[in-house]
Image (cartoon, coloured by chain):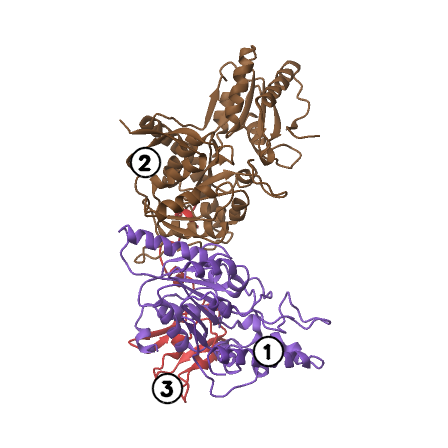
Amino acid sequence: MANIKELTKKNEPLSGGHRACAGCAAPVVVRQALLASDKPVVVGSATGCLEVTTTIFPYTAWNVPFIHNAFENSAANVSGVETAYRALKKRGSFDKEVNFIAFGGDGGTYDIGLQSLSGAMERGHRMLYICYDNGAYMNTGIQRSSATPFGANTTTSPAGKKIPGKTQFKKDLTKIIAAHNVPYVAQASVGYWNDFITKVQKALATDGPSFINVLSPCRLGWGFPPEETMEIARQAVACRIWPLYEVINGTWKITFQPKEVTSPLDWMKKQTRFRHVFQPGNESILQKVEEQVEKEWQELLRQCGQA
Amino acid sequence: MSDPGYKELPKGGLILEGGTAAKYETGDWRSQRPVFIQENCINCSFCWIFCPDSSIIINDGKVSGIDYKHCKGCGICAFECPAKKKAIIMKSEAEIEG
Amino acid sequence: MVTKEKAARTGNEAMAEAMRQINPDVVAAYPITPATEIVQIFSGYVADGLVDTEYVAVESEHSAMSACIGASAAGARVMTGTSSQGLMLMAEVLYIASGMRLPIVLAEVNRAISAPINIHCDHSDTMANRDAGWIQLFSENSQEAYDNMIQAVRIAEHPDVSLPTMATTDGFIISHGMEAIELISDDEVQKFVGKYQPAHPLLNVDKPITAGALDFTDYYFEHRRQIAVGMANAPKVIARIGKEFGDKFGRYYGFTESYKLDDAEVAIACLGSTAGTARVAVDNLRSRGVKAGLLKIRVFRPFPAEEIANILKNVKAIAVLDRSDGLSNFGGPVFNEIRSALYDLPSRPLVVDYIYGLGGRDIFVADIEKVYQTLSDISKSGKIGDLVQYLGVRE
C-alpha cells in the first residue's frame, strides 16, 4: 500500500505545461507510476499521445531521463537502455541503482509494438512496461486498435448504416503477457491510484521483466466530460469490463472487488462512442457485451482459483 | 529573441534539462477555473494524485493552492474532492474575469 | 613496433574478430544469412568470456537496431550486424540512429533484397539505405572488412561526426571467402579505439535529458541540418583516421583507391569485391596496350565527389559498375552520383552504367574486359550508345 502523504514529499516527476488534453489520464498514469519508484527512473516511450504531448521541443515535461525512439519499439528501446546500464555497471563506469520504465499506448503495445514487447519480456530485462490503454489510436484521431472495445465507434470502425462500430472484442493483452511467464503482470486502473501505485512498486521490486496494463480513459475518444476521467476508469472496474488483478510468478489474484457490481451497459451509456449501440435494433450488441464480460469474469475467477 | 539556429542547438534533438515544459503556459486553455477553499480541505491529496497537469501545489502534504499557469481546468480535482463541503469548486473563467 | 599476426579469416570471421578486440559494451543482433556468422561467432566469444560485452539476442532486426539506439543513447559503445531484409527491416530505425547522432557501428553484409528472395551478394540493401545518414565503408576483402570495422568505431564516435557507421562486405564472396589477413594485437586495437566518451548519456540521472523529442516546423529543419554538418565533417575525420591507421599498422585508407588511372583513357568505377576482378582485367588490357584504369570506391557515404572528379577528369570514357538497380530508367545509384560528380569538370568524360551481379550473379574478368572494349569504342566514336546496360543477364 502506498502512503499518499509520503508520495507528496517526492519530487514532481512530470512538469505542467505539457500539451495533453484537459482531463487526459495518461499524464496521471505517468505521475503515479514514477512516484512509486524509490530509485531514480529512466523512462522510454512509444510514439503516441503521451510522447507527443510531453516532448514538444524545446519543452519537455519529464524531470527524469526520457527517450523516445519510434512507435513499435518502446520495449526494445528500453531493453537497450537497461542492457547498457548492466554493461556499464559491470565495467565500473556507472554505480547507481536505477529503475527502467517503458510506456506505450494500446496502439504501440497491443498492435504495432507487440513483437517488440514480447521479445523484451522473453529476454528477461529488468524493466517495467506500462501500457496506458485508452482503447484506440487517440493521437492520430481515434482510429480503432485491437484494444478498442466491441461496438465502439472510432474513425476506422465507424458506426455506419450497416456496421454498428467495432465488430471484434478487445484483445486480452494482459493475459498474453502473463503467458510469457514473466514474474509480475497486472491490470490496473488510473482511477484506483493506490492499487496502481502498489502494483508499480511490486513490479519495480521484481528482479526481471514486469508488465502493467492500466486503463487510461480518453475523454475525447470515449466521449465524456473531462472531470469524469477517474470516475469512468473506476466504473470500468465496477462493471467488470476491466477487472483489477495481478499475476505474481504464475499465481493469479484479483486485487480489488467492487462493492457494488454494475452493468457494463451503464458504463457504456456514459460514453458517446457507444451511443449508437443503444439505438433500437442493436440489442444483440448489448447482449453480446454482457455475455462476454461475464464469460471473461468467470474465466478470471477460475484462474484465481475462486470459481 | 529569435529561435536558435542549427549551430547553437545541441546535437541530436536533445533537450539537455528536465521539466522545461514548465516554461510553457497552458493556463489559457482553461474555461473553468478550480478555486481552492482551504477551510474545507481534509488533506486527502486526491486532487494532487489525480491532476494531469501537476498543478496542485502541495507543501508538507497540504494543498496550498493551484498553479494557474498550467492548470487546464479539466475539473478532475473538484470532481474527486471527497470533502462534504468541496475544497475545490469550478468557476467559469468568463464570470471571474467579467 | 606493433605486433602483427597472419591468420586465415573469412570476412565474417574477420569482422567478428574485430568486434572481439573492440569489446563493445553492448551488441544487440539478430541472425540473417550471410551475416549470421558474425553475431554467432561473437555470441560464442561472449559465452566463453573472451569479451565482457552484454549481448542481446533480440527477436528481429528492427528490435536489434532499436535496442542499439537505446543502449547507445544510454552511453554505451554499441555494435550490431545484419544484411539484406534485416537492413531493410531496420530502415526506419537506421534513420533514427543517425537523427539522434548515435555512433553505432554495424557490420553489414551486402545481399540482394526480395522479391524474389535471394541470399547472395548485391548492393541493393546497402544502397537502399544510402541516405539514412550513416557513414558507409565498402570492403574489397576480409582484410579491409577487419580494418574498416576498427576504423568505423573511431569515425562514428568522433565528436565532429557523431554518426552511425556501417562497414560492409559482399555476401558470400567476402563474408564466406577465406583469406590470409593480418591481425592487429588486442592491445593495439584497444589503444586505437580508445574509450567512448558520450557527451550526454541518458543514464546520467542527476542531469536528466530528453532524447527523441518531437519537432514541429520550427526546429525539425535545424536538427536535420545538423546531421548534414556531421556528414560534412566526416571526410576530414575519415582521412585522419585512415592515415593514423596506416601509420600504426601499415595499411593506409582513404576514400577511393586508384589503379593505373594516371594515364588511363578508359576506366571502370566500382565498389567492394568486384575491384579485385577488375584489377586483373586492367592488367590484361594493359598488357595488350589498352590504357585501362580502375577506381575503387571505399567510402560511399560521405560521397567523395570532388576526389572522384579530380581522379577521373582526364579519362575519356568511364563505366560505372552498379551492383544494384535504381529501377528509375536512369541507372543505378553509383552511376548517378559519379556522373553528377563529373558535371562541373570543364571537359567531362563520357559515362555509362552497367548494372551487374544482382543476386550473386558472378562477374568474370572476361565480362569486365568486354566493358573496357565498349569503353574504347565509346572513347573513339564519342558516342555512348545505351546509357544503362545490364551485364551478365540472360536475354
* Subunit of label 2: C
Q: For the point 29% across and 29% down, which residue is it?
A: C3
- Furthest-top residue in this view: C289
Q: Amino acid at mark 3?
A: Asn
Helix, strand or loop at mark 3: helix
Give the number of the mark in front: 3 or 2.
2
Q: Amino acid at mark 2?
A: Val
Chain colored red? B
* Subunit of label 1: A
Rendered hue of chain A is purple
Distance between mark 3 and mark 1 Cα atoms: 44 Å
Chain colored brown? C
Helix, strand or loop at mark 2: helix
- Report if the CB atoms under discs 1 and 2 are less than 8 Å apart: no
Tag on residue A292? 1
Q: Is residue C340 above or below residue A214?
A: above
Helix, strand or loop at mark 1: helix
Relative to residue C338, is residue A167 drawn left or right? right
> How many residues crowd around disc 2 within 10 Å: few (fewer than 14), some, or many (20 or more)?
some
Quickly name the residue at label 2: C189
Relative to residue A126, is residue A141 drawn left or right? right
> How many residues crowd around disc 3 within 10 Å: few (fewer than 14), some, or many (20 or more)?
some
Quickly name the residue at label 3: B40
Q: Amino acid at mark 1?
A: Gln
